[in-house]
Image: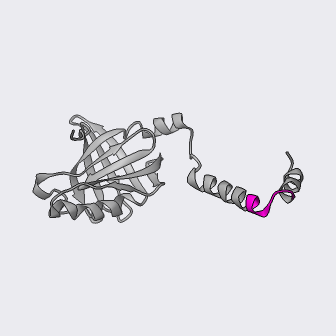
Amino acid sequence: MSISEFLKLLRHLPIAAVVSLSLAIQSVSAAEPELPMPPVAMQRAWKPLTGSWQLLSAFDSKGAEQEGWFPNGISPYVNFSNDGGYTVWACNFMTWRGVPKSGVIRVGEAGVTTMGGCDEELARLQPRAGALFSKNFQYRVKQDANGAVLTLTFADGSRWEMTPTPAPKAEK
């Protein structure tokens, strides 16, 4: 159907139907973001990151070790899935979608938080972690004799060094 045929068709519809059609088209296009790459390419791009990573150490933008990321000996972790999603746990589960390319994860959809209960010290980590992961960040996976180390460098210049760990299991 050509554009002129479509416009002729619209002239014969009641105005309420045209408005409804327009709103439906806008909501569909807004609700379904364009995939930046085909699913197979997305899976390949995420492959080095896929899995659960536990925080080993955190550094500020000048390289000094940051305090307060391990309250009560508990360490935040990040779980990357090969479909473009990643979840950060630091009291609650915060989930985003992103696209890895050339060592940078471009953050897409905003995070969703699944609420849970935790102590006050751990609860203070959530906004700090959320601020780091809600902006584009760099990643590098390095393999050495001790295994893999994932380094995440955030927009503010701080960085996390992480080690692979089995994904945590949900309580039943």
Residue displayed at 20% across by 56% down: 117
Q: Is residue 21 visible?
A: yes
Residue displayed at 45% across by 44% down: 84
Q: Position of residue 19 (x, y in %)?
A: 72, 62
Which one is in front, 167 or 139?
Answer: 167
Q: In the rendered view, does 138 fall on the left or right side of 127?
A: right
> In the rendered structure, which segment of residues is drawn in magenta?
12-18
Q: How is the image coloured?
A: one colour
Quarter of the image that includes the N terminus: top right
Which one is in front, 40 or 171?
Answer: 171
Which one is in front, 82 or 105?
Answer: 82
Identify the image quadrant of residue 24.
bottom right
Q: Position of residue 64 (x, y in %)?
A: 21, 63
Identify the image quadrant of residue 137.
bottom left
Magenta-drawn stretch contains 162: no
Identify the image quadrant of residue 14.
bottom right
Residue displayed at 56% across by 42% down: 37
Magenta-drawn stretch contains 17: yes
Quarter of the image that includes the C terminus: top left
Q: Position of residue 47 (x, y in %)?
A: 41, 36
Q: In the rendered view, does 136 fall on the left or right side of 57?
A: right
Q: Is residue 64 visible?
A: no
Residue 52's place in the image compared with 113, above or below, is above
Residue displayed at 23% across by 52% down: 76
Q: Position of residue 97 (x, y in %)?
A: 44, 50
For the image shown, how many numbered marks are present on the structure?
0
